[in-house]
Amino acid sequence: MDDRTITLIGDDGKEVKAQILFTYHSDDFDKNYVVFMVNGQASAATYFDDGTGSGRLGDIETDEEWEMLNDLLQEFVENQKEGACGGCCGCQGDCGQEGSGSDCSCDCKGN
């Protein structure tokens, strides 16, 4: 996931590249999540690291998880509008804010 893309395999066996918007670990649910864009639509999944760099995705299981992820996505979108990257590289989303003093190493618009 280092290149900010993820390859999804559809039911028909075709591979589709998706752009990772952000990842998130929830202490409340004790899960890792990945939020991504595929075919122009945002989606999300749980992410299980298998230690090889490939990992696997799982389903979002509860309405509470979807609500949390939707709130995070809305915050991400607002940060994008304000010129920040949303914290995609550990900069806490303020790399594009004037006077933040944060050096962002990502390819976001905040650079």
Image (cartoon, rainbow, N blue to C red):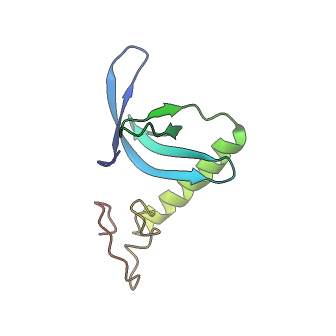
Nearest the viewer among 67 and 103 is: 103
Nearest the viewer among 38 and 10 is: 10
32 horizontally vs 95: left or right: right
Q: Is residue 10 above or below residue 25?
A: above
Residue lying furthest front: 51
* Any part of residue 65 in sight: yes
Nearest the viewer among 60 and 50 is: 50
Please state the horizontal and vertical placement of residue 96, each as a whole percent of the image: 37, 73
Q: Quadrant of residue 99?
A: bottom left
Please state the horizontal and vertical placement of residue 58, each as a whole percent of the image: 54, 31
State the residue at coordinates (39%, 46%): 20
Please state the horizontal and vertical placement of residue 13, each as a whole percent of the image: 36, 16
Quarter in which the N terminus is drawn? top left
Nearest the viewer among 52 and 86 is: 52
Q: Is residue 28 above or below residue 40?
A: below
Q: Quadrant of residue 84?
A: bottom left
State the residue at coordinates (42%, 65%): 90
Q: How many circles with numbers are drawn on the protein?
A: 0
State the residue at coordinates (29%, 69%): 111
State the residue at coordinates (64%, 47%): 30
44 horizontally vs 68: left or right: left
* Any part of residue 44 in sight: no
Residue lying furthest top: 12
Q: Is residue 3 above or below residue 47?
A: below
